[in-house]
Amino acid sequence: MPVPLNELERNILDYMVRYLRSNTYQPSIREIGEEFGIKSTKTVSEYLGALAEKGYLERDPSRSRGVRLLGVDLKPDAVSVPCFAQVPDGDAARRAAEPESQFTLDRRLSGPKGSYFLRVRGEQWRSIGIEPEDLLLVEPVGTGSPREGDLVLQGRGGSETLWRFSRRGSQYLLQPITGGDPTVVDDPASLDVAGRVTAIHRRLGGGRIPMSTTAH
């Protein structure tokens, strides 16, 4: 069994997995150093050596990108989906944020590029069957593109709200899921939606879904 990693070793391994999934090849030692502000390539090499000794990768020191990750499934029909405890403020911030976990899903279930999980932290959405610790799969939407009846997520930074989206002529309506009068949006450009919720993942029998920061 691989030896546990310290925080920086884990972060380097996670970065290497994400880079490999995005580029199909490993980052160079210099690129790893730039990502973590490590100026010495020797120091980066020492971290890679530690990961190799602990059983997380194999190295070919004669090659700049001579690293093979162990125990990472890179099948083309699977994709890694990040999970957040709260939606970062803005799409650029979300892409740069460190997720609390990663889940590998079949591409047919994971949604389009940019999809992510939001872990429900409270009981505010129990009225529509969403329980604490449920994982909501959120797909990105552009301005004006939610579909009639979509369950849309609005707000970021820990103050998210769910609405049922509909249209009335040129206006957009955001219906509270708990009932009450809808919020009317006259200007489509002002509709700030973090995404549409398309699936709920839940561990039956209670308990939190096991988390892993590495995108296996």
Image (cartoon, rainbow, N blue to C red):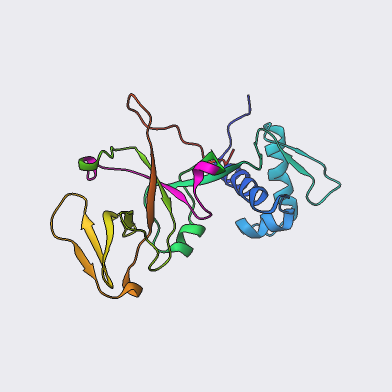
Q: Position of residue 192 (x, y in %)?
A: 34, 66
| Quarter containing the N terminus | top right
- Occupied quadrant, residue 6: top right
Task: Residue at 40% x, 58% y: name it.
Answer: 88
- Which residue is at the front of the view, 93 or 184? 184
Q: Position of residue 104 (x, y in %)?
A: 54, 39
Depicted 215 relative to depicted 29: above or below: above
- Which residue is at the front of the view, 48 or 157? 157
Task: Residue at 36% x, 58% y: name it.
Answer: 147
Q: Which portion, as a residue range, is magenta?
A: 108-126
Q: Position of residue 90 (x, y in %)?
A: 41, 64
- Occupied quadrant, residue 214: top right
176 is within the stretch colored magenta: no
Q: Position of residue 8 (x, y in %)?
A: 58, 46
Seen in the image, is 117 located left or right of residue 49? Answer: left
| Quarter containing the C terminus | top right
110 is within the stretch colored magenta: yes
Task: Residue at 14% x, 60% y: name it.
Answer: 181
Seen in the image, is 146 located left or right of residue 114? Answer: left
Give the total of numbered labels.
0
Seen in the image, is 92 located left or right of residue 157? Answer: right
